[in-house]
């Protein structure tokens, strides 16, 4: 059983003065949702997600060893970093990175030894409910682990990815599902071997052909920043009147979807995924304070998907994150028909007609 202590770095067997890396990490879309967390970013219930391919964060990390003649006290900053977003300084992102460094310092004490330049960009709108914090923190964690690999060259690949997922989780819970694998489980579950609250693990069973290259077309109903941050949303589960039932439901649905992903039962997949999406929003609507994150166009899209599926028997469904945008999920073999339906009937409900075509990916990639 791996514990947090296993991720504490102690081996300064190598030294480095400066280097740079670049990693891209994808967003992910949860099928069984994680909503509510305990101390230290531990999930209140397990979750499972599809890793995406096109919606990603690309982060370049450059670092230089601090001048040994300048004491940390003189700089008044334990962590030294510059943050660029799309090539320009982004001061309002810096507190989140500062907090992330503070959280992971005990596992990565070498962070205080360097000045970092973090240059990051997204291929999709940030803070709009497409899990930009997940891809962003995953990409940063991969870069940090590349630094750690230089300091400890004997690190195994398995440990590299496990600790990257562990670190990413401390920045944004769902980020641990954006490190590796097309389908990822996060959170201890009795039926998933190796599952952990500390990091995400690849779905350990054979994925049915129905789910290979599964499609996700994201309809951008509202590209603005979402009404409530994920952190605040998760906190609403404390003392929520339906929290206990919800956490039990998530365990049950993960058991069900485990079987579905093996057998390829698309009808059952649709039932679980749509129920999970609506439950997530129901929990926010029944919390105190309460929030409605769906927009009128979100509901119009859902109703049109239901009507289209009923009339055509094509296995297309929706899911939602904590925002107004709609993820339209469907098998690759009906792609042309579903995309035509989206163009004909759903694009008009998107902000400026914008949508993103995505598919299941494989996780973070190092850019050479």
Image (cartoon, rainbow, N blue to C red):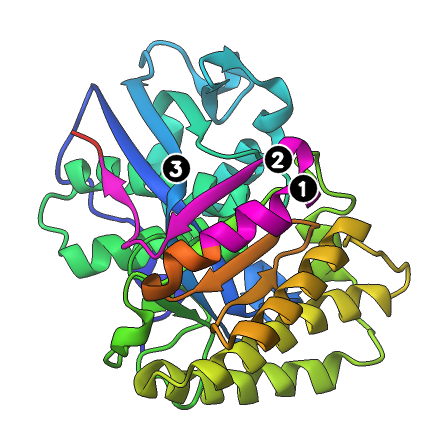
Q: Residue at the location (49% across, 48% down)?
A: 134
**Sooner in the amino-acid sequence: mark 1 or mark 2:** 1
Visible residue check, residue 130: no
Q: Are marks 1 and 2 in contact (CB under 8 Å)?
A: yes
The region drawn magenta spans 339-366
x and y, in percent, of residue 344 in the image: 58, 48
**Sooner in the amino-acid sequence: mark 2 or mark 3:** 3
**Sooner in the amino-acid sequence: mark 3 or mark 1:** 3
- Where is residue 351, by image quadrant? top right
Q: In the image, 266: left or right of 172?
A: left
Q: In the image as oriented, which residue stretches furthest toward the right?
A: 289
x and y, in percent, of residue 199 in the image: 39, 64
Identify the mark at residue 348; answer none if there is no mark. Answer: 1
Q: What residue is disc 2 on? A: 353
When the figure is inspected, residue 40 is found, relative to residue 76, above or below; the finding is below
**Helix, strand or loop for disc 1:** helix
Q: What residue is disc 3 on? A: 140
Q: In the image as oriented, which residue stretches furthest toward the left?
A: 154
When the figure is inspected, residue 74 is found, relative to residue 314, above or below; the finding is above
């Amino acid at each position: 059983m791996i514990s947090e202590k296993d991720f504490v770095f102690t081996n300064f067997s190598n030294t480095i003065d400066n280097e740079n890396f670049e990693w891209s990490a994808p967003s992910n879309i949860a099928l069984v949702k994680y909503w509510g967390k305990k101390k230290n970013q531990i999930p209140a219930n397990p979750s499972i997600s599809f890793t995406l391919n096109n919606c990603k964060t690309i982060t370049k990390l450059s670092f230089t060893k601090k001048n040994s003649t300048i004491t940390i006290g003189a700089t008044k900053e334990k962590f030294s970093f510059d943050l660029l977003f799309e090539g320009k300084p982004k001061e309002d992102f810096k507190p989140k990175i500062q907090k992330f460094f503070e959280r992971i310092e005990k596992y990565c004490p070498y962070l205080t030894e360097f000045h970092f330049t973090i240059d990051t960009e997204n291929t999709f709108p940030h803070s709009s409910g497409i899990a930009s914090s997940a891809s962003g923190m995953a990409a940063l964690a991969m870069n940090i682990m590349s630094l750690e690999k230089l300091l400890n060259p004997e690190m195994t690949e398995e440990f590299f990815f496990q600790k990257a997922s562990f670190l990413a989780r401390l920045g944004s819970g769902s980020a641990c599902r954006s490190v590796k694998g097309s389908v990822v489980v996060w959170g201890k579950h009795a039926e998933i071997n190796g599952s952990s609250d500390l990091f995400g693990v690849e779905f350990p069973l054979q994925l049915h052909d129905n789910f290979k290259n599964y499609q996700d077309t994201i309809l951008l109903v509202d590209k603005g920043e979402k009404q409530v941050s994920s952190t605040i949303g998760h906190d609403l589960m404390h003392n929520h009147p339906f929290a206990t039932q919800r956490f039990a439901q998530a365990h049950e649905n993960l058991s069900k979807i485990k079987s579905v992903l093996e057998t390829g039962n698309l009808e059952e997949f649709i039932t679980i995924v749509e129920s999970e999406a609506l439950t997530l929003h129901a929990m926010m609507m029944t919390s105190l304070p309460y929030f409605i994150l769906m927009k009128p166009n979100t509901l119009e899209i859902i109703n049109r998907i239901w009507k289209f599926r009923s009339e055509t028997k094509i296995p297309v469904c929706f899911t939602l994150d904590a925002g107004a945008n709609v993820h339209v999920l469907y098998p690759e073999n009906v792609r042309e028909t579903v995309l035509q339906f989206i163009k004909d009937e759903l694009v008009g409900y998107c902000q400026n007609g914008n949508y993103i075509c995505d598919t299941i990916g494989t996780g973070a990639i190092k850019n050479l």
